[in-house]
Image: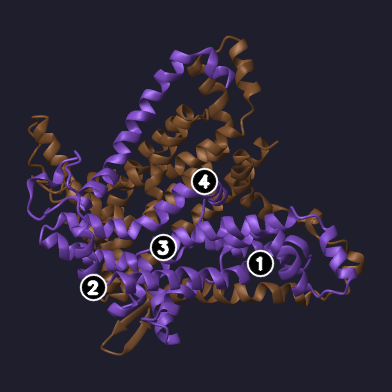
């Protein structure tokens, strides 16, 4: 604050460069918004213009909605993100607790073993994981898409860190009252660990909402398509007909939920992401 | 606050190196009654999935890369998949493209991210708005970014060519994705647009961890802005920089969604990256031998990267206070 006051003009000069960058960065979003609202966009030369041209219409959105299978894609994506997150919450809480509070032989080795998952992300292992899905009978099921993410090294680290910051008195008191370990984890610690869990949920949902290659590989029937996979086939269809307004509307439908959440809960998002680094 | 979070992220490496996390363990007296088995039981749910989808696949892909099919169903063990892989000019091309892609995305996006973080360090409403805009692309799927950029790069009528024509430049009929000499550059541009904001968040967090007193002290000693940045800020950002670099390297090898949607590796293989090559061999050519061998090479690279990064992150702890 002080530095800002001392050197006002300099500070504004410094902001010229990021302002220019932000303008440039905003262009794809601005185009998406304008083109999706443009009336009668098909084949029009104005479609490339970044100037708002009223009257606006929702025609492109209704076209996109009827030509794509958005209700199905939304449903599958929500199921995917929700299913992964629900199982992860259990696995990362249990393992996070073990690493935070218990002492056992091989702890360090096991911790390294967890760490590996940060690097060996599913996209790189599509070939062998496909074979595994086939032999488990999970190929072309949403459960198969979810399964590789049920364990999360990042989640375990995060929960371990979160549990460590909770004073031990809470557990001691519960222990004295005769609570079991699982009761302690789920009834005492987890409610106190809510900020850590929320941070994890944000990172987990964002990365799975946006994922493409693995769901593309692990499913084949249209009824199992998620938003990203749907959007890819939708785009190539609408693109062939030069229906750019419809492409923009479809893209908007896919991206909007997270963008809205981000703008509403920006601080939480930013803190979660910087917490994470690795998804 | 944010500085803490990023150094926390940097501790991921360090905690693994701890001999034993003593202060986190319960005092042994009463807890010894609780059998050690329980610790393993708590880890078991995670490990079932780690084994099935992280460790086992590594072994499986190693085995299938060494399995050579002969005369229909007969198989032998051998290196011929690797021989074929290294002899395949498409693979060599993908590795080369991936190196260009790595340099082309990492250098500009890290430089930009650092510069933006320094410029937007002070928190006002205006800087918060600029940060939000620049961070926005990290929230959308890479395929959604690809959908937008397919139009932006459309030859003639697309956004870029439209405005290049308005500006009267001779580039207004450029086929950004269809010209083999430009396509990889266009793919790089999307990646920079998509990832710079993400990296900027880390630098902002790292900068927030640097005490103002240090910078003020340098100022009192007569250091100019450039000197302050090079002598004070940059060295203190070392661990953050190392961390971001590792994430960026990981992204370079594991994200090809835009290639699949926009160019399918073309034109003339100019945008084929290693993971795209793997996808192509597995998905389109059904050549599991080549796909497996290429996967093993990628996994080996990631193993090496994680070894180096663990060390790098461990070194990072010296900056923590």
Q: Position of residue B141 (x, y in %)?
A: 35, 57
Chain identifier for the purple-coloured part of the image: A
Is residue B309 or residue A165 the one in the foreground?
A: A165
Q: Distance between the residues labelled 1 and 3?
A: 22 Å
Instruction: Establish if A16 lies above or below A261.
Output: above
What is the distance, in whole Å, between disc 1 and disc 4 at their CAs? 22 Å
Residue B6 lies left or right of residue A170; in this view the side is left
Q: Mark 1 against mark 4, which lies toward the viewer?
A: 4
**Residue A150 sits above or below residue A192 on the image:** below
Q: Residue under label 2, please give it.
A: B284
Q: In this view, does B28 lie above or below B101?
A: below
A71 in relation to A221, above or below: above
**Residue B257, x across and y down, in percent:** 31, 59
The chain displayed brown equals: B
* Mark 4 lies on residue: A270
| Numbered mark located on residue A209 in the image | 3
């Amino acid at each position: 604050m002080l530095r800002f006051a001392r050197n006002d003009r300099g500070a504004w000069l410094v902001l010229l460069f990021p302002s220019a960058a932000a303008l440039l960065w905003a262009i794809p979003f601005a185009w998406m918004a304008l083109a999706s609202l443009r009336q009668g966009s098909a084949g029009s030369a104005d479609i490339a213009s970044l100037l708002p041209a009223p009257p606006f219409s929702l025609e492109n959105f209704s076209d996109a909605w009827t030509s794509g299978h958005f209700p199905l894609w939304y449903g599958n994506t929500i199921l995917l993100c929700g299913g992964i997150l629900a199982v992860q919450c259990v696995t990362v809480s249990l393992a996070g607790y073990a690493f935070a509070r218990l002492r056992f032989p091989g702890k360090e080795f096991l911790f390294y073993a967890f760490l590996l998952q940060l690097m060996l992300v599913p996209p790189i292992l599509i070939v062998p994981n496909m074979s595994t899905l086939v032999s488990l009978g999970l190929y072309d099921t949403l459960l198969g898409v979810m399964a590789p993410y049920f364990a999360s090294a990042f989640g375990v680290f995060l929960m371990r860190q979160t549990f460590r910051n909770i004073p031990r008195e809470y557990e001691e008191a519960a222990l004295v009252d005769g609570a079991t370990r699982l009761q302690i984890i789920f009834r005492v610690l987890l409610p106190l660990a809510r900020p850590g869990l929320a941070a994890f949920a944000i990172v987990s949902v964002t990365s799975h909402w946006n994922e493409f290659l693995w769901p593309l590989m692990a499913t084949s029937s249209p009824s199992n398509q998620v938003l990203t996979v749907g959007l890819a086939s939708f785009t190539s269809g609408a693109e062939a007909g030069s229906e750019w307004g419809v492409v923009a509307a479809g893209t908007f439908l896919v991206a909007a939920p997270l963008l809205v959440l981000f703008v509403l809960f920006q601080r939480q998002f930013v803190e979660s992401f910087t917490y994470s680094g690795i998804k | 606050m944010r500085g803490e979070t990023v150094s926390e992220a940097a501790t991921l490496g360090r905690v693994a190196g701890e001999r034993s996390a003593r202060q986190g363990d319960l005092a042994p007296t009463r807890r010894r009654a609780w059998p050690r088995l329980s610790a393993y039981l708590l880890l078991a749910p995670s490990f079932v999935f780690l084994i099935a989808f992280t460790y086992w696949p590594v072994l499986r892909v190693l085995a299938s890369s060494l399995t050579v099919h002969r005369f229909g169903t007969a198989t032998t063990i051998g290196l011929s998949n690797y021989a074929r892989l290294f002899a395949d000019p498409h693979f060599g091309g993908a590795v080369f493209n991936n190196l260009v892609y790595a340099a082309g995305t990492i250098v500009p996006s890290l430089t930009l991210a650092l510069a933006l973080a320094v410029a937007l360090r002070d928190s006002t409403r205006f800087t918060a708005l600029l940060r939000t805009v620049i961070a926005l692309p990290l929230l959308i799927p890479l395929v959604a970014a690809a959908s937008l950029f397919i139009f932006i790069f459309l030859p003639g009528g697309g956004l870029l060519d439209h405005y290049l024509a308005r500006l009267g430049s001779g580039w207004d009929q450029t086929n950004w994705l269809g010209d083999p000499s430009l396509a990889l550059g266009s793919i790089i541009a999307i990646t920079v647009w998509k990832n710079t904001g993400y990296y900027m968040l880390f630098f902002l967090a790292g900068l927030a961890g640097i005490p103002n007193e240090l910078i003020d002290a340098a100022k009192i000693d007569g250091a100019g802005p450039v000197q302050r940045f090079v002598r004070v800020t940059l060295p203190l950002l070392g661990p953050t920089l190392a961390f971001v670099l590792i994430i960026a390297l990981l992204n370079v090898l594991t994200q090809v969604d835009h290639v699949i949607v926009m160019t399918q590796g073309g034109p003339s293989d100019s945008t084929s990256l290693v993971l795209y090559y793997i996808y192509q061999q597995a998905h389109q050519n059904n050549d599991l031998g080549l796909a497996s061998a290429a996967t093993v090479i990628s996994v080996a690279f990631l193993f090496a990267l994680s070894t180096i990064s663990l060390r790098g992150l461990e070194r990072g702890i010296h900056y923590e206070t």
